[in-house]
Image (cartoon, rainbow, N blue to C red):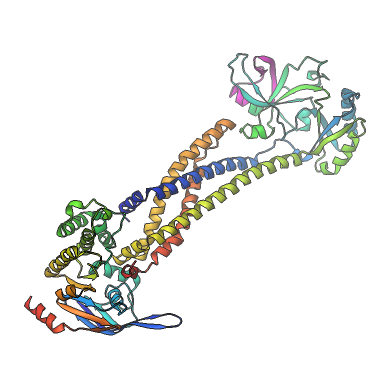
Amino acid sequence: MDIKPIFLSLKQNKFMTILMIVQIAFTMGVLSSSVLVATDTLREWGMDSGIPHEDIIRISPEFFDENQDIGQALVKDIERVKQMANVINVAPSNAVPFTAENMINVYLTAEEDAQEYKTVVFHSDENIFDVLQLSLIDGRMLTASDVIRGEEGTTPENASQVMISQAMATALFGEQAAVGQTIWLAKSSDPVQVVGTYSNFMTGERLNGRGKSYQSIIRPQVKWSQARQPNYLIRVEQGKATAMLEDIIDVFYLERGRYINSSELLKRTQKRMYDGRGSRALTMLVISVILLIITGLGMTGLTAFQVTQKSKQIGTRRALGAKKSDIMRYFLTENSIITIIGLLIGVLVTLTITFELSEQASQNFMNLSVLLLTGLVMWLVNILAVWFPAKRAANIDPAIVTRSS
Amino acid sequence: MLRMENVSKIYRTDLVETHALRKVDLHIKAGEFVSVTGPSGSGKTTFLNLAGALETFEEGDYFLDGQNVKGLSDDKLSEIRNQKIGFIFQSFNLLPDLPLFDNVDVPLRYRGMSAKERKERIEHALETVGLASRMKHLPTQLSGGQQQRVAIARAIAGEPKFLLADEPTGNLDSLMAQQVMELLEDINSKGTTIIMVTHDDQLARRAHRNIQIFDGQVSDIEKAVANDVIRSA
């Protein structure tokens, strides 16, 4: 079919044409951006946690009685838990996998303009490797003698040696060996030496969102204060965690002057993380689908309006020899031209939005095949939206031309 | 050229049946200029619709250029309209979004002609009606008479067997009507058969032959005169 007459007609109806193009471009921009972010979010669902999270319990007690000795309670808690049947190991930790939110920047040099690397630092003791079942990749494991313990304020020194995850090592040093290197845990200060690398485990959503889920550092120190009391990570025999949770909570309540702020299986922590993520992705997709339906209905409405407006012109075309299929093709081609122009502008909108989002999240959301697929779906939806009014147009009686208007 | 045998058209609703045309027998020869008159509601428009293959009918046979159009598919009827008939309407029915060139182009595109051939035909048709210099103008930039001339150009560009004109001067003042009528007569003199529906008795009398329709029935009152005209032409 020749598209010249269609272009001429669109040119004469600029306002309507531009309106439809803008609507399609806007929908394409929002829809594809949402789909890109949603697919990226959902893609990480299948990621390995790196730990036996079904067999690990986290307990977060909190002293309300300021006269209690937190350090002493820490020792007693660990003793009591270790004595329980089916408990394999326990470690205090300032952060919990899947919910570690205390993201910091680390640096390879002490210079002011040193490059930033995002990570989460777990403060724990030598048992964390056994609890989380992390394996040694390179260098040496941290031992009890590396661990610094004490109350914040009265224990000013910090551990000067750390282990970093394999992903962290790759991010910082690439192919080079990480062991023996020095990194700075704050800008121009707090230098530490890397003594070993361990297998990856998932930290939390803040790093997940940046595609850096596995970048972590373990610093062998256990410090506490009234404001910051350690969590406990407890690994039990396989399949026993659910049954043991209540007994473990009871053990922690043996200590006076505190309550259990949070207690759950890490399996549950992980599910919570994914549920939140799923809800976000779902909300975005639902909004996008609603927008797509609105655009489709808008397209149906505008085309139906045009068909009514131009019924005599359509009848004239029919009288002059247009077949029903010619009329259908006319409207579908006209719609496709508008849709394709709208989609091309929509792609530019999408690139702008995803560029901004990617900049903010330090993560590349762009995925060409998802973008193309979204465009294709929009085109099909628009074809469907125009199909029925076009069908109505094709059925206009050619004899309409001899009726007085 | 055009032969109707016993053609009837009945419009049916749930409650009533309206006999718009009753057993019409009619023969129009190639090269004739026939006017069709009759009061409002007599069946003129129905006759026009059937003659132009714009509507189907239930009874009788209608031979157009030797082909019986009864029972043909919608696509086939479209082809016949496109290739054998040129339409001229009272309200011109030009497509307002398209320049004159593209308006004349409409039926030619449906015929699937090459761009070169279409261009030649359009230019020739617009020259014939005296509007070649304005082919890039939109219909709204023309007077009524000029618009009707464009419609005539569109009708003749495809060199159809016959023209079907529905009150072609109905919306024009007398001067414009005169010009359009002369143009039609000129086209007819070159061999194109013309059937013109009109209210204007003066115009009707300028045709070779006048057919009157009353209550759906055709009376061919000037047949003898028409035959003389054809013979002498």
Q: Quadrant of residue B90?
A: bottom left
| Horizontal relation, residue A213 to residue A262: left or right | left
Left/right of residue A377 with respect to residue B228 in the rendered view: right
Give how far across and how far down residue A69 sits, in percent: 90, 23
Q: Which range of residues does the magenta coloring cover? A: A169-197
Does residue A285 sit above or below A145 in this rendering?
Answer: below
Q: Nearer the viewer, residue B177 or B24?
A: B177
Let me know if residue A79 is in the magenta part.
no
Q: How many marks?
A: 0
| Of residues A403 and B122, the one drawn nearer to the viewer in this rendering | A403
Residue at x 63% of width, y 35% of height: A209
The residue nearer to you, when weighing A191 against A180, is A191
Q: Position of residue B137 (x, y in %)?
A: 24, 51
Answer yes or no: is residue A254 visible.
yes
What is the x, y in percent for residue A1? Answer: 33, 56
A69 relative to A308, above or below: above
Q: Residue drawn at (62%, 46%), measured in percent from left and top?
A: A283
